[in-house]
Image (tube, grey):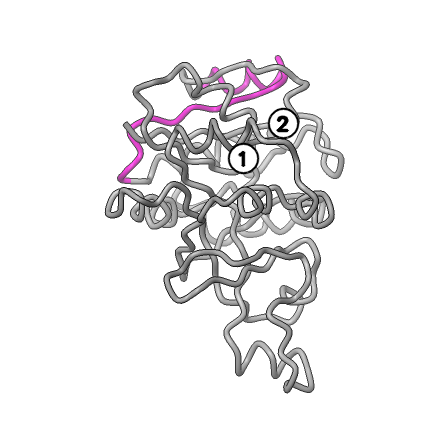
Amino acid sequence: MIVGVIPARFGSSRLMGKPLANIGGKPMIQHTYESARKSKLLDDIIIAVDDEKVFKVVKEFCNHVKLTPKEIPTGSDRIAHVVKEMTSAKIVVNIQGDEPFIPGKMIDEAIEPLLFDTSVEVSTLAKRITRVDELTSPSIPKVVFDYNNFALYFSRSPIPFVRDAKTNSERIKNYEIYKHIGLYVYRREALLKFTKLKPTDLEQIERLEQLRMLENGFKIKIVVTEFESLSVDTDYDLRKAREYYDKYIKDND
C-alpha cells in the first residue's frame, strides 16, 4: 500500500496558522489534500495535524486525519509517528502541507523509482533552476547528484560553483543547476530508521534534514521533474498563492 501523509503544523514561525490560511474560500491544507488526491498511485492520504483547531477544520473534508503531539520536531517525525503502526503501508510519501497546488503527476514521478527498483529506499525531486533569484536564495536548497541520479549533496548555497562563469545569469543559462523540491518518498522501514537517528553536523550547519540521511549512508534517488510547485512560507508567498488561484484554479474549482 502507498500512503501519502500531509504533515500540518499550526505554529509556523513565519506564518502562524498556515494550514488554515484562506485561499479562495478554502484553507490551504484543503487545497493540498485535493491536489494530492489527483495522484494515480496513492492508495490513501492521511493529514497529520498538531492542533485541535486544524483537526476540526480538516475533519470537515477528510476522514483520515490524525491529531499528533505538538512536541514532534519535524514533518518527517510526524509522519513516522502516524505510520509506525501501519504495517500495511509499504511506501510512504511526505507531501508538504504548504504546497497547495502540487500536481498529482509530480507525486507519481517521485513514487515511480521505488516501484521499479527494489533497491531504492528514498526518492525526491529536483528541477533545473531558470531564475537568478532561485539560484541565490538560501531558502531554496540546491542539489547535485551522480550519473545514476543519486544525491551527492544538498546545500542552501549555489552548487556546483561554476568557476568559469562571470555572472549568475551565465551560470543558469549554460550549466545545469538544480533546486531541490521537498517531496520525499520512503520505504516505511527507511523512514522509521531515519527518524530514529540523531541530527548530524552538516544537517545542523545547513539546516537541511536530508543531509542526515546522506551522512548516515542513505542513498537518495533524484527524479528530475519539469513540474513546478508553489510553496507557501511567508505572507508574500500567500499573496502569490491567492493570485495563482484566482488566475489558474478558480474557474475550474
Looking at the image, is mark 1 or mark 2 earlier in the sequence? 2
Location of residue 247 in the rendering, given as x and y in whole percent from the top left corner = 50, 54
Looking at the rendering, the stretch of residues picked out in magenta corresponds to 40-60
Q: State yes or no: residue 59 in magenta.
A: yes
Q: CA distance from mark 1 to mark 2?
A: 8 Å
Q: Quadrant of the C terminus?
A: top left
Q: What residue is disc 2 on?
A: 9
For label 2, the SS is: loop
Q: Which residue is mark 1?
A: 97
For the point 57% across and 15% down, the residue is 68
Dot 1: within a 10 Å radius of its alpha carbon, few (fewer than 14), some, or many (20 or more) residues?
Answer: many
On screen, 51 above or below 170?
Answer: above
- In this view, the residue farthest toward the left is 116
Q: Give 187 or 240, whichever is nearer the viewer.
A: 187
Residue farthest front in this picture? 217
Front residue of this view, candidates 242 and 132: 132
The location of residue 190, given as percent across then percent down, is 43, 33
Tell me if residue 185 comes above or below residue 90 in the rendering.
below
Q: Image height check: is 96 above or below 64?
A: below
Q: Amino acid at mark 1?
A: Gly
